Image (spheres, helix red, strand yellow):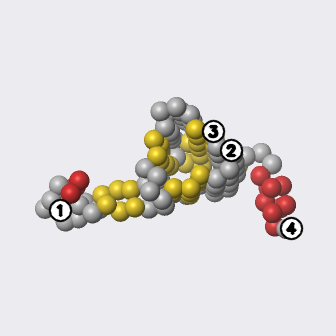
């Protein structure tokens, strides 16, 4: 099960959403970008580069956030509302801002990592 809020946008050419992801209203995935090369043609006529976007299980993406091409959002992580995520987010991290920055670990995440290591 995944919950997707209204007015969301997915450039879903190479996108995977894991189980139990929460997707806030208006949040976006951009999975492609123009290379801008060569410089003597308009950017929109340059080659399109498609990069994978992964949102691992249990992650929560805040309202109006934007996930850029090539980013992985780790298991159980939280992306604050209105954030622009330009790089990978580790599992159980809380990030926010423009660009999104690490704020703190979710309480109890060490227990989750310890349990996973024991398996």
In the depicted view, which residue is nearer to us: 110 or 27? 27
Q: Position of residue 34 (x, y in %)?
A: 30, 58
Name the residue beneath numbered marker 2.
1
Q: Position of residue 8 (x, y in %)?
A: 49, 37
Name the residue beneath numbered marker 3.
3
Vertical comparison of 69 with 22: above or below: below
| Disc 2 to disc 1, C-alpha distance | 44 Å
Tell me the crowding category of disc 1: few under 14, some 14 to 19, or many 20 or more residues within 10 angstroms, Cα based. few
Name the residue beneath numbered marker 1.
39
Report the quarter where the N terminus lies. Answer: top right
**Mark 4 or mark 1: whose residue is earlier in sequence:** 1
Question: Is mark 4 in CB contact (under 8 Å) with mark 2?
Answer: no
Tell me the crowding category of disc 4: few under 14, some 14 to 19, or many 20 or more residues within 10 angstroms, Cα based. few
**Mark 1 or mark 3: whose residue is earlier in sequence:** 3
Residue name at image x 77 percent, y 52 percent: 109
In the depicted view, which residue is nearer to us: 88 or 103? 88
Name the residue beneath numbered marker 4.
118
């Amino acid at each position: 099960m995944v919950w997707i809020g209204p007015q969301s946008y997915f450039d879903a050419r190479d996108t995977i959403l894991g189980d139990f992801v929460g997707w806030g209203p208006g949040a976006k995935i951009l999975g492609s970008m123009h290379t801008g090369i060569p410089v003597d043609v308009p950017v929109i006529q340059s080659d399109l580069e498609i990069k994978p976007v992964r949102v691992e299980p249990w992650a929560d993406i805040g309202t109006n956030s934007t996930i850029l091409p090539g980013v992985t959002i780790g298991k159980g992580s939280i992306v604050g509302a209105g954030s622009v995520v330009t790089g990978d987010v580790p599992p159980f991290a809380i990030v926010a801002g423009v660009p999104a920055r690490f704020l703190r670990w979710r309480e109890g995440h060490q227990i989750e990592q310890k349990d996973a290591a024991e398996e």
